[in-house]
Amino acid sequence: MKIFHKGIKILFILAICVQSIMCILWVFKCGLSMPDTTENSFYLEAARTLRFDEYTGVIYPVFLRLLYLPFSGVLGRGILSVLQLIAIGVAAVFFLGIFDKKEISLSTRIGIIIYVLTFPVIIHIAFQTLSEAFAVAIFLVWSRLLMRKERGAKQNVTIVALYIAMGFMSL
């Protein structure tokens, strides 16, 4: 049984390494270039003009205007992508609850964090100009709070606040 657990651990470490290398290669090849998609150009135009339609949220274009447009280019893309990746990463760590369990070693925790942050969908969302990055982060925190059994009044207020924040992402 011990050999089985050791084999699973080695396969997991190997999967983390392969996924991390693929993620790094993708970031260097595609990550910092602005893809020519309708959503990217739509949000950037909304940030430049601050004109919205009934489907555009207000918060994300204002965020782009404050943090992305002053830097624009590769520096602006890098800042935006890192901020979105940090938001998703912190929310994913909280969602998984890996710091709640004392028996997990620090190296295992770091491995899990790297593994989650290099999921292709997470990297894709973080390196796009889309409000979904912050919506995913808020949803993960909200879901984790809902899953806790020992919720008190303070956590219930936080859950309601996060639910309202998810709604404001679409305002």
Image (cartoon, helix red, strand yellow):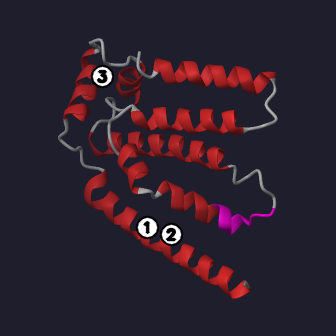
Secondary structure beneath dot 1 equals helix
Q: Label 3 neighbourhood size at 10 Å, few (<14), some (14-19), many (20+)?
A: many
Q: Earlier in the sequence, mark 3 or mark 1?
A: 1
The one of 106 and 75 positioned closer to us in this rendering: 106
State the image coordinates of residue 103 (x, y, percent, origin top left). 80, 63
Span colored in magenta: 103-109
Which residue has dot 2 on it? Answer: 16
Drawn side of residue 114 relative to residue 106, left or right: left
Q: Residue at x 61, y 32 (%)?
A: 142
Which is closer to the viewer, label 3 or label 1?
1
Mark 2 and mark 3 in contact (Cβ < 8 Å)?
Answer: no
Q: Residue furthest front?
A: 1
| Residue type at the position of mark 3 | Ala
Which residue has dot 3 on it? Answer: 47
Drawn side of residue 151 relative to residue 131, left or right: right
Which is closer to the viewer, label 3 or label 2?
2
| Residue type at the position of mark 2 | Ile
Drawn side of residue 152 relative to residue 127, left or right: right
In the image, is residue 125 above or below residue 163? below
Mark 2 and mark 1 in contact (Cβ < 8 Å)?
Answer: yes
Q: Label 2 neighbourhood size at 10 Å, few (<14), some (14-19), many (20+)?
A: many
Q: Earlier in the sequence, mark 3 or mark 2?
A: 2
